[in-house]
Image (cartoon, rainbow, N blue to C red):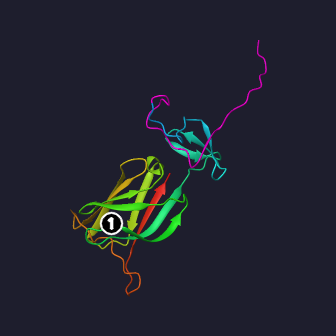
Amino acid sequence: MCQDQSARMIIKRGSGVPTIPVSADHRNGDWIATDIYEGEFYQDTDTGLTYQRNGSTIVTASGKIVQDTYKAVVSQTSTGDPVIEQELQNTLGLTVTTSYVLTGSYGLAGLAGNAAREVEVTLSGLAATDSFDANPTSANTISLRTYSSGVLADDVLLYQGVTYPRRYCILTINFY
């Protein structure tokens, strides 16, 4: 015999966009406050937006893939920490801090758990012989490495914002 039931559904709430956990069991101690199960709803108390997890993707309740962006003009000289010359976009309100690790290797911290999301890093304005790579090293930090002619090198992130021709590098981090 089938009977109608009334029940309340509780939606998980928290500050910030939800994240995908590193394990399937929330009881083992490695989940953070914003981790959700597949199919679970989550409300960001900062914005009022509601999200859900669809496989390994966080989407809004409407099904749109979530993208947040941090974009800034950056520079670095000698063995100094990289400098955020100008913040261009910061949809999460992050306070990104930088550090010098080794020649051509730097840390970008203050990502407030967002590096645990899918991350896409671009760096424009490099010279033709220069390149970079970037990888999350924790939920809060990304490692950035710069190369000149294939060798780890400092002084790749140049900034000449006042003189002509102007030259600068724009770091963009998209979080999905």
Q: Secondary structure at mark 1?
A: loop
- How many numbered tags mark residues here? 1
Q: Nearer the viewer, residue 47 or 166?
A: 47
Find residue 52 and report its image quarter.
top right
Region of the chain picked out in magenta, as a range: 1-28
Q: Position of residue 34 (x, y in %)?
A: 54, 42
Residue appearing at x 51%, y 43% in the figure:
19
On the picture, is 137 further left or further right than 60? left
Q: Position of residue 53 (x, y in %)?
A: 56, 40
Residue appearing at x 48%, y 50% in the figure:
114
Find residue 2 and report its image quarter.
top right
Q: Position of residue 56 (x, y in %)?
A: 49, 41
Q: Identify the residue position indicated by label 1 in the image.
A: 81
Residue appearing at x 65%, y 47% in the figure:
62
* Residue at the bottom extreme, as displayed: 164
- Residue type marked 1: Asp
Q: Nearer the viewer, residue 118 or 106?
A: 106
Residue appearing at x 26%, y 63% in the figure:
104
On the picture, is 131 further left or further right than 51? left
Q: Could you classify mark 1 by the number of other residues whose Cα lies within 10 Å: few (under 14), some (14-19), or many (20 or more)?
A: some
* Residue 158 to residue 162: above or below: above
Classify the position of the N terminus by image quarter: top right
Residue 26 lies within the magenta run: yes
Q: Position of residue 35 (x, y in %)?
A: 52, 39
Per the picture, the main secondary structure of the magenta-coloured stretch is loop
